[in-house]
Image (spheres, rainbow, N blue to C red):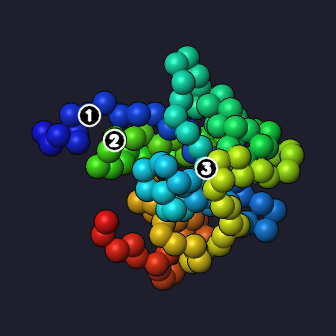
Amino acid sequence: MTAAAERTPVDVAVGVLVDAEGNFLLTSRPEGKVYAGYWEFPGGKLEAGETVEQALRRELHEELGITIGEAHPWKVELVDYEHARVRLHFCKVYAWKGEFEMRERQSMAWQTLPVAVKPVLPGTLPVLEWFAAERGFAGPTHEPVQPR
């Protein structure tokens, strides 16, 4: 068993916000966080006693200033980073209220395939592949990231 496999995963709720045209929202990781400047789907760690939807609702309000409608559980992915092992609980969100506010001084961009923003966080790559499969998209989903 590798050292990464021995680490207890951190559960993270991830919002895959999809607008009426099928574009999806990516946000950049703010300065001071691991992988600062990388693009990802927004979300955050579950706190004790929270469900995935409760954590997602809280995180998206804290980070983006919006109140989401229903969160539709989609897929779960286990990702090993150098700093942590995370279990990403991806939920699609089609409805929200409020104006987007970048409360952590991050950036946001509505995207389609292939995404124009870079670099893309490794934990985001499976979602781009899932979108490609759902949408019948062929070709690269993103620009490859140079090793850190």
As shown in the figure, which amino acid type bears the numbered disc 3? Pro
Dividing the picture into quadrants, the one containing residue 58 is: top right
* Element at label 3: loop
Q: Is residue 108 left or right of residue 81?
A: right
As shown in the figure, which amino acid type bears the numbered disc 1? Arg
The CA span between labels 1 and 3 is: 23 Å
Residue farthest to the top, as pictured = 49
How would you rate the neighbour count of disc 1 (Cα within 10 Å): few for under 14, some for 14-19, many for 20 or more?
few
- The answer to whether residue 51 shows anywhere in this view is yes
Q: Give coordinates of residue 40: x percent, y percent.
A: 54, 57
Q: Are marks 1 and 2 in contact (CB under 8 Å)?
A: yes
Dividing the picture into quadrants, the one containing residue 117 is: bottom right
The CA span between labels 2 and 3 is: 17 Å
* Element at label 2: loop
Q: Is residue 130 above or below residue 8?
A: below
Q: Are marks 2 and 3 in contact (CB under 8 Å)?
A: no
Residue farthest to the bottom, as pictured = 139
Label 2: which residue? 84
Q: Give coordinates of residue 133: x percent, y percent.
A: 52, 68
How would you rate the neighbour count of disc 3 (Cα within 10 Å): few for under 14, some for 14-19, many for 20 or more?
many
* Element at label 1: loop
Dividing the picture into quadrants, the one containing residue 62 is: top right
Q: Give coordinates of residue 110: x percent, y percent.
A: 70, 67
As shown in the figure, which amino acid type bears the numbered disc 2? Ala
Q: Residue at x 13, y 39 (%)?
A: 1
Query: Mark 1 or mark 2: which comes first in sequence?
Result: 1
Label 3: which residue? 42
What label sits on residue 7 in the rendered view? 1
